[in-house]
Structures are given as structure tokens and as C-alpha cells.
Amino acid sequence: MIVLTPTAEHVRQCADALRAGQLVAMPTETVYGLAGAALDPAALARIFAAKDRPTFDPLIVHVAIDLARPRLEQLRSLVEVEQLGPVARDRIERLLQAFWPGPLTLVLPRTGLVPDLATSGLPNVAVRMPRHPVALALLRAAGMPLAAPSANRFGRISPTSAADVVAELGDRVGLVLDGGSCEVGVESTVLLVAPGGGLHLLRPGGIALAQLAAVAQAPVAMGQPTQGPVVAPGMLASHYAPRKPLIMLPVAAMRIDPSTWRALHLPPHRSVGLLAMAGPGPEAARHLAALAGVPVQALALSATGDAAEIARNLFRGLRELDAGEADLLLAEPCPAPHGDDAGLLHAIADRLARASADRTGTA
Ligand code: TXA
Ligand code: MG
């Protein structure tokens, strides 16, 4: 894999590769994506192969629209706008005005132009306009929509730097544009808008439910609609998983006493890695080491418990502990969603739950 600095010439080189059906790993503000031509089934097949991704898990189509013009209209080649009623259209337009470019993916009725492979044969397509300047430059230079799942092997930790992409995909991909560390650190919020205008949160991300509801002026339901076919595949219980076993602590490490520790019934281990939400790490490590009787290496995701900082460092921290000495990983619970940080905190808790979920029976 060749890692390229994002100069205008390198962006052009990557756009040419994409137009020729090749794959390029690109930075976005959330995580790095593995991009390919969204309307080219052969390119889409390469994405699934490079990631070892099952084809029942659909891809997000990335676009760069003209921000000065009405937004939904510009998605007509991908989205069957006629299938959406006036209430849905109005809500979508308001959401796109408020959150694009940015970490909001909308799931909308698709047109016949979108290959089945992009949507896993579902009647909807997921679309998002990223705000990372390198992603936008690449989309504009390519002049076409790009399908891009996170640039990790299926079920594993999402990459938040070009080095992470190299570690995940190695020679399975030719080119990666290095856009630095991702600013948000967790994937986009995925919101389904039904033809009648109903809103359903399919994946929590940086944008809180309350923010979505305020902008759309409508309530947002959690999860997929209870009626009708499955619309949220790919949301497997086990995902974002390190190689080592990861177990969630019931409370912050400093609050664990000997009886709580014993009740955890941890599997045999020689050394522990602790993913702490807030610092100081060394103090938590000493506290747990006294209980465990084995060395503990702690990594604090934030000095102060700031939600944006925890999100930004989450996947990097998991990756670092996974590569370290410990043979068992423990994670502190993330603070309960509150105030302006509710969306991010919800997304962090979701990723930790999936990273620590039972892996039997999943890829
Ligand atoms: O932040 C992000 O969204 C990143 C960056 C690269 O843009 N991308 C990303 O893609 O997270 P991926 O493939 O890791 O997650 C895509 C998820 C699917 O697993 C599924 O849950 C949902 O988005 N999705 C995609 N297409 C869908 C569809 N047609 N209907 C319902 N859900 C869909
Ligand atoms: Mg992913």
C-alpha cells in the first residue's frame, strides 16, 4: 500500500484510480473509509473482498453536493425522491441543511442506478456528505459518488489514521490518502427517513437524537421500524473488536472494591490492559493491580472525561492496548448520555458494547 500526502496531484492520482475501478482509502472526519466507485459493481465487489465483508452489510455512498443549492434535489440520481411524501422531503431538506457536510448518513429510497451490491439488495440507499477537506477534494476530483465503508477488516476496529489503515488492510489496497487523525473518531449517525417522514435512528453517532429531532421538528424513534422488512442490517452485536478478550467494568476502575472484582469472574490472565475514560491512568492502574495481583497498563482516553476527546481517542486506544503486553482488556463504562454530548456518549457506549460483545457465531 502506498501512503500519499494529500497534495492536489495525489488527489488527482487517486481520483484517476477510482475512475478506473480501483480502491482508495480516504480520510473522513469520522473514520477512514475504503472508497470505490459507488455505481460500478466491480469496484463494489473489490471493497467487499478487501474487507472480507459479507454482502448482507450495505455500504454508505459518499457525495459532495453544491451547498448553495437545495440539497435533496441534488441526490436524484441516487434517491427516488418521488417515493418520499412532502413531510419526508421537508424533514430531509432541513436535516441536510443543518448537518451536511458532516457525520450524518441518511437512509432513503434508492433509484435503479444504485447497484444491488451497494445496498445489499435493500430498497434504500445510505448517503452522506463528509466534511473532511481531503474527502471532499477526492469526491470532487472523481466527479462521482463513492461507496466507502470503514477501512478495516470486517468486525474489527475502525481506523482513525493512515497507519491504522495500513495495519488493517496492508496490501489489499493500493493507495491511501493521509489526512491525519480523524477529528470525530466514531462513525456517522445513521438515520432512516421513511416515505411518510418517520425518523428512525439506526446507528448512534456524533449527532444526538435531540438535535436531530429539533432540526427535523419531529420525534426520532430508536432502531428500525417495528413493521416491514429488515432495514438495518450490519448492526451486529459483535463489532469493532480487538483480538484480545475485552470485558466491560460495571463502574469506573477507582470504584471497584475486592468483592466487585471477585464478582467479575475474569478469565485467566497474566497482565491486564485498562481502557480508562478519564485520567489519571496510573492511579487507576495501581488500584486495579492491587486487586488483580498482576501488572496493569492503563490508557486514559481523556484527562478530563471530555466526550469529544474520548470519542476521538477511542479506537486508537483500543488498538494500542490490543497491541500491548496485556492478555486481557478491561474497559470502564462511558459516562451516561447528558446535555450537548448525549449523541457522542451514546455512540461511545454503543461501540464499547459491540467491542466487548460475545463473538461466538459472528464473523
Ligand atoms: O462515518 C461513517 O459512516 C464511515 C465513514 C467512512 O464515512 N463509514 C462507515 O461505513 O461507518 P460502514 O460500512 O462501516 O457502516 C455502514 C453501515 C452498515 O453497516 C449499516 O448499518 C448502515 O451503515 N447502512 C448502510 N447502508 C444501509 C442501507 N441501505 N439501509 C440501512 N442501513 C444501511
Ligand atoms: Mg464499519
Image: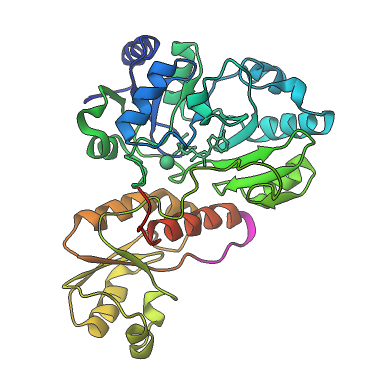
Quadrant where the N terminus lies?
top left
Dividing the image into four quarters, tell me where ligand 2 lies.
top left
Residue at image coords 72%, 32%: 92
Question: In this picture, is 20 found above or below 49?
Answer: above
Viewer-proximal residue, 147 or 312?
Answer: 147
Image position of 323 (left or right of 140): left
The magenta stretch spans residue 93: no
Residue 29, x across and y down, in percent: 46, 36
Report the number of discs.
0
Residue 60, x across and y down, in percent: 51, 31
Residue at image coords 27%, 22%: 175
Image position of 218 (left or right of 133): right
Q: What span is colored magenta in the figure?
A: 335-340
The quarter of the displayed image where residue 254 is located: bottom left
Residue at image coords 54%, 52%: 344
Residue 232, x across and y down, in percent: 57, 43
